[in-house]
Image (cartoon, grey):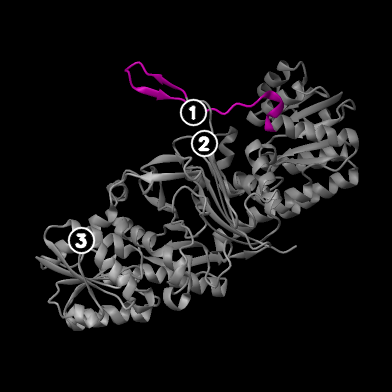
Amino acid sequence: MIRVGMMSFAHMHAGSYAACLGQLPQVELVGVADEDEARGRAAAGTNNTDYYDSYDNLLKQNLDGVVICSENSRHLEMTGMAAAAGVDILCEKPISTNAADAREMIDICRSAKVRLQTAFPCRFSPAVAQVREVVRGGRLGEVVAVKATNHGRMPGGWFVEPQFSGGGAIIDHTVHVADLLRWYTGAEAVEVYAESGTMFNDMNAEDAGLLTISYDNGMFATLDTSWSRPKSFPTWGDVYMEFVGTGGVASVDAFVQRLDLYSDENMTYGWSGWGSNIDIGLIRDWVDCLSSDREPSITGEDGLRALEVALAAYRSVGSGKPEPV
Amino acid sequence: MFNVAVIGAGMMGSLHAGHYDALPDSRVAAVLDVRPDAARALAEVYSATAYGDIEEMLADGSIDIVSITTPTPYHKECVLKAAAAGKHVFCEKPIATTLEDGLEMTEACRRAGVVFMVGHVLRYFPEYASAKRLIEDGAVGKVGMVRTSRGGSFPQSAGDWYADKVKSGGVTMDTLIHDFDWLRWSLGEVVRVYGKGLLERAAEHKDYALITLRFASGAVAHVEGTWMRPDGFKTSLEIAGSKGLIAFNNEDSAPIKLAFAGSDGAGVEAVPQSPLSAEDDPYRLELADFLTAIKSGGESPISGADAVEALKISLAALESITTGQPVEIRR
């Protein structure tokens, strides 16, 4: 059995990851540790596992891996504990709130010889993976530009408190697409220009971000990271990419496989998704990594590269100019 | 009854002529084109006089209005001469490719006391006019992030002038100026522009641009223009505000989609169609508004000054594409 623990349920994706782990027969979900006892006990109950009142006690349970879903600002601290216990890590995105912490996480794990994976589940969307093959297969010719969005609703909670999250919509919604564009094209971002603002809510973090990213192969991309979906919108948001090539155009809208649901019960219209669960792909891949000697398919460096695009965007907002990544 | 001279007997010239003919207050009296066959063919439809020389045509005192649908580089000469001859002037967008030319044309028409309107027709498209009305009604609260998209395949033209980046300015000048004008009309002045684009590849029959606009109001717009889309002409619009969101795309709202079986049984698809009543046709509305302004002695519905402001945004976008830096718009 692969023995896995969950460190913190501060990030809402923890619930889905735990449920995915529960679906895999070769995995034993050993326990949930969370300094928020009520949250930790509830999560442990939902997932039929034990609650630990300290991360150290959880890490003493002879684990093969831990999933870190704390606030972004605590990823370094959690990674340090897990690495010291010699336990492999799946860390929620963004890898950190800043590059120094992210580099330290990578170094700590390298020194401790534990494997650090960044959670980028969008790579496991069948549609996203299929369009990657189209782009890499060359039928589009030279890919010259990409138009992308990762829209959402304002998540609230610690996500809008920069001391925990590192920012707002830019840090939250840059990294998925920044990672996918590297993964698709192999190109590295070299420069970012960004406009942002707090446009839809009254709060301290930005809820709108529009990045223009230049790549080392001459390609350019824009990415709208805004939490601009109103409460009345039928779904949470989107991950959309349109690749413009000299030989054609390819687009992928990762979360549109759905039923339209019109309900008189509460006078709502909403989407009921039926697409494949991307989190199970991520978790299955990570568990496969834990059961083998291979490197993670998405490394800490991958997490850092994606984070650097977001950090360059913040610098650009500050300077009003394009900033090197 | 206004006698109209149409200069430029291409696609837009034919379109304008049809609307002038259909409107109750105007008729097509003359058609001018440097290609005699084109001038003659369009003139014949309306029993109008075909010309190849602008001086000769403008000497006809019965002509009240000159409607210019030439390639952009000829706009200035035509507008200046028509104004000097005391004709009211309608000119297709973009007004010109330089600010100096646009200002000179505007000033010449002002001095001549003629009505000068520039064809930023998007203001008369019902989807865009309705979206502006919803914004003004407060339907989405304070406008934050706006996304627009426009384009299809590389435009074909007499002399292939769109492939000349200097003459046409590519998609950023020729196509996106529609969205720039609508955005400025709806959201107010633009203060900063940043863009990426492929103007340098116009000669290869390729152009694509992604432009970011920052408005004085604080709103931001993402403007996509493409001449690299092989699957038909598409437009879309999204306006996200503090209390809601407006979304539109031309495919989803097209009431007609036709597909016919090919000879081998394979489907042969036609473009989606979105017909309007003749009186709601955006070009009809635009030219009717122009005639009303002339009759009433009123202000031009879309003035040279408006067109120059839209041109400033296109030029700033092109400058940003060239320099890699954001460009502030001053006024």
Cα–Cα gap, marks 2 and 3: 46 Å
Q: Which residues are magenta?
A: B258-282
Residue A294 belongs to the span the image colors magenta = no
Where residue B32 sits: x, y (%)?
74, 28
**Visible residue check, residue A251:** no
Q: Main secondary structure of the magenta part?
A: loop
Where residue B45 sits: x, y (%)?
71, 16
- Kindly report which numbered mark, 2 or 3, lies closer to the viewer in this rendering: 3
Left or right position of A52 against B302: left
Which disc, if any, is residue B271? Answer: 1
> Which element is circle 3 on?
helix
Q: Nearer the viewer, residue B105 or B326?
A: B326
Q: Name the amino acid type tagged 2.
A: Phe
Where residue B181 sits: x, y (%)?
68, 48
10 Å crowding of disc 1: few (<14), some (14-19), many (20+)? some
- Whether labels 2 and 1 belong to a single chain: the reply is yes
Left or right position of B288 against A96: right
Residue at x 75%, y 21% (from the top left corner): B22
Cα–Cα gap, marks 3 and 1: 47 Å
Question: Residue tagged by mark 3?
Answer: A21
